[in-house]
């Protein structure tokens, strides 16, 4: 009986602890851009990853959704706080206060939910069009460009929902938008 139990434990450990993870990794390497976050290179320089959110915190950039994993692609996950959790409420209140400090012309009711809550993975590279429009005045002022010019750029970067069904109807890939901003309207004092 003991031998059968140990054989089962070792077999299970080898199958699910070694062979299965290695096979999934090998399959992922056949599609390296998908499995490795889809690296984005500009002029041979790695600028970020298409499938992993980046942290942007300065005024001339559009900011990503908050991340409960500090934008660490090796440590995905949400906070797991439920909507009635007091820690979650405090976290959201803090994010609202920060956004209102950075956008004094706005009210709390103007803030889209995706700017104060993280995604399930903590790494969503997209924000809603409404979240981008909320930030538009700050970015335009910091870049010294018109809001109309920036709105045209937002419209070019707007994507539909996944398969037309899932998620917000209109989203924007933050990193790609910020890369275009840097290319077309470079900062004189970054």
Image (cartoon, rainbow, N blue to C red):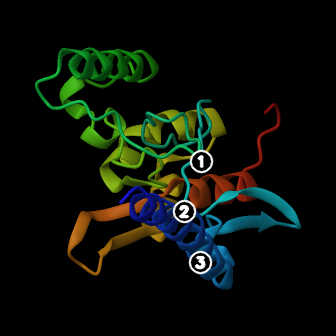
Q: Which residue is mark 1?
A: 74
Q: Which residue is mark 3?
A: 23
Secondary structure beneath label 2:
loop
Name the residue: 34% across, 15% down.
Answer: 94
Quarter of the image with the N terminus is: bottom left
- Which mark is first along the chain, 1 or 2? 2
* Image quarter of residue 39: bottom right
Picture disc at residue 161 = none
Decide which of 26, 16 is in the foreground and name it.
16
* Lower sequence index among marks 3 and 1: 3
Residue 140, placed above or below residue 45: above
Q: Residue at x 62, y 52 (%)?
A: 178
* Residue 51 disc label: 2
Q: Position of residue 54 (x, y in %)?
A: 59, 46
**For the C terminus, which image quadrant?**
top right
The image shows residue 184 at horizontal and vertical percentages of 72, 58
Say which of marks 3 and 1 sits in front: 3
């Amino acid at each position: 009986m003991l031998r059968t139990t140990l054989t089962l434990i070792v077999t299970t450990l080898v199958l699910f602890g070694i062979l299965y993870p290695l096979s999934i990794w090998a399959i992922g390497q056949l599609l390296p851009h998908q499995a490795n976050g889809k690296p984005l290179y500009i002029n041979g320089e790695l600028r970020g990853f298409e499938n992993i959110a980046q942290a942007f915190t300065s005024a001339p950039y559009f900011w990503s959704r908050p991340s409960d994993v500090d934008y660490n692609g090796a440590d995905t996950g949400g906070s797991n706080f439920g909507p009635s959790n007091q820690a979650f409420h405090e976290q959201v209140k803090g994010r609202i206060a920060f956004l209102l400090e950075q956008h004094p012309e706005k009210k709390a009711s103007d803030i889209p939910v995706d700017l104060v809550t993280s995604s399930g993975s903590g790494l969503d590279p997209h924000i809603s069009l409404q979240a981008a429009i909320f930030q538009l005045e700050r970015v335009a002022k910091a870049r010294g460009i018109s809001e109309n010019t920036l709105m045209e750029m937002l419209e070019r970067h707007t994507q539909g929902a996944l398969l037309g069904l899932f998620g917000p109807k209109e989203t924007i890939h933050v990193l790609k938008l910020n890369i275009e901003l840097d290319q077309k309207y470079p900062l004189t004092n970054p």
